[in-house]
Amino acid sequence: MTKAGIGPAAAALLAVALTMSTFAAARAADSPGNPGSIERGRYLVKVSGCNDCHTPGYLPANGNVPVDKWLTGDGFGWRGPWGTTYGANLRLFMQGISENEWVEVARTLRRRPPMPWFNLNAMAEDDLRAIYRFTRSLGNPCSPAPNYLPPGEEPKTPYALFRSPPKN
């Protein structure tokens, strides 16, 4: 008998049960339905600027856009020497890929301005997973944003113009 009054077999079973419950708690904290992970994703989307380009009217409304409109893509263009880019509908994009695929995409993504892909590439994996889970929790992906337009093609939507820097 041990000091606790249980035999070695019972102590071993208790140790296994405690280990398994700790492992299960850790897995639950990382599960897709975990509200904590989803709330972390909401926070990251808000503070990292995802909404600035991927949510219609977010910047002009000083961020006062209902969450049901978040990440549905925007028809406002960003025009420069690269052409005209639009904030993609991230809900629609993430509907077509798994969480692991999203992490891989986020690690290797290269996009035209103004997308700060280098910031996304540098995010911690847990943060990327939280963003994925939050985005997927938003539901209906709605319609796609307009497609990229090559240089010289005039956008039919409102846009911001980025001029080339002057040559010295």
Image (cartoon, helix red, strand yellow):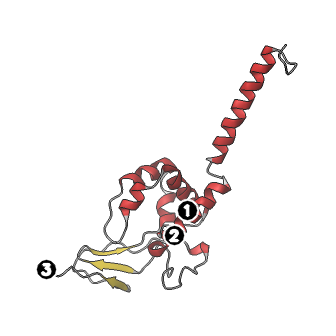
Q: At which x and y percent is residue 161?
A: 30, 84
Q: Nearer the viewer, mark 3 or mark 1?
A: 3
2 or 3: tag closer to the N-terminus: 2
Placement of 145 over or under 122, stated as above or below:
below
Q: Name the residue under label 3.
A: 167
Is residue 124 left or right of 136 when viewed as pictured? left
Q: Mark 2 points at which residue?
A: 71
Q: Name the residue under label 1.
A: 135
Q: Which amino acid type is shown beneath numbered disc 1?
A: Thr
- Circle 3 packing at 10 Å, graded few (<14), some (14-19), many (20+), is few
Q: At which x and y percent is residue 166?
A: 17, 82
What residue is drawn where x is 45% and y is 49%?
A: 101
What residue is drawn where x is 28% and y is 81%?
A: 162
Placement of 114 over or under 109, stated as above or below:
below
**Badge 2 vs badge 3, beta-carbon distance below 8 Å:** no
**Badge 3 vs badge 1, beta-carbon distance below 8 Å:** no
Q: Is 4 in front, or is 47? A: 4
